[in-house]
Amino acid sequence: MKTIPCNPNASEEVRSVLNYLSEIQGKGIITGQHTQTMAQEELNYVNQVTGKWPALCGFELLGYSPNINYDDSGEECLLEVAENRDTLQKAWEWTEKKRGLLTFTWHWFSPLGGRDKSFYTEHTDYDVRKAIVEGTQEHKALLSDMDHMADILREFRDKRIPILWRPFHEAEGTWFWWGSQGPAIAKELYRMMYKRFTYDHGLNNLIWVWNSPLVEGYVGDDVVDIISRDMYPPAHQHTDLREEYEELAGVTRTPKLAAIGEIGPIPSIRNLSESRIPWLWFMTWSRDFGQTEKFTTNNELRSAYHCDYAITLDKLPKLY
């Protein structure tokens, strides 16, 4: 069954990816790995351990935020920004050479004011309630940042590369500024971005991924292609995440494609092959989650990637 994109002007590549995702529901799960440095240690670690590549690679856009306060940031923040610099080169390589699926996460430094890692609520006094009010400085700064990011994403549109776009992630929490004033505000921010990117910038290569399990915070089917949530179970706990799926599926009355936006310990692919919980993909987070055995042993990782139910890069058809 074909999935109709929320954007009526979605590109053929977007439609191709969504149709493929519809086809694999309950038949397999796409393996994914987040990266945020030029070295992509996590991606190489997966390949070294399993002999395979994930079918989906996640990239981080934090270093591309236009309002980073370099003068009032700690060493950890500055290092993270420096290591993230120029990583879009790797995103190009991933899509042009490997033809893998691509997803972006944006830890968005506060559009106005803030210090250090100002995507965290505690590091900015940016009033997100004013950001949704036209004419305010907060609103102007928000749109300026959106336009900046749209310029970056436009290059991918021009090369007809589809992106699984997951903005305002973990909108159910208050730890990031976009969720600091509750889910209703986060929902408004998402809808503002959808309108700006889709109708003002014509970014018809984006597949819109909502990232929160809250019913009261759900942004609406008209601007969402895929629902998702982030999960960090205890180390070495690998299940099919049935309860978490059922909770997420309950945010909307109409059936939606569903994915694991971020995870620490990988789900049990073997259990999923039996239960057929229709998660589309999982994306293991970076650093220790994706390049050590602290959360997933090498045996578990190897077993997962070699399970028939796992969709690795070599099993991914040409979608764009």
Image (cartoon, rainbow, N blue to C red):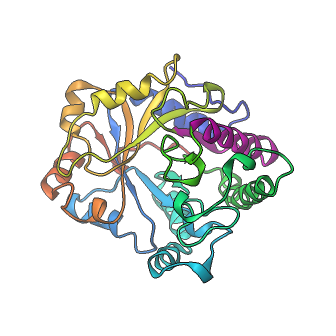
Name the magenta segment's main secondary structure.
helix
What residue is shown at x 50% (from left), y 67% (from top)? Answer: 90
Relative depth, front residue between 252 and 120: 120
Q: Position of residue 69 (x, y in %)?
A: 63, 75
Q: Position of residue 137 (x, y in %)?
A: 81, 58
**Residue 231 can be seen, yes or no:** yes
What residue is shown at x 67% (from left), y 43% (from top)? Answer: 189
Relative depth, front residue between 1 and 300: 300
Position of 201 with respect to 24 (left or right) is: right
What residue is shown at x 52% (from left), y 30% (from top)? Answer: 19
What residue is shown at x 67% (from left), y 69% (from top)? Answer: 67
Name the image quarter holding residue 37: bottom left
- Up the image or down, 87 lies above or below 199; here it is below
Position of 261 with respect to 71 (left or right) is: left
**Residue 203 can be seen, yes or no:** no
Q: Which residues are drawn in magenta? A: 183-210
Position of 198 with respect to 245 (left or right) is: right
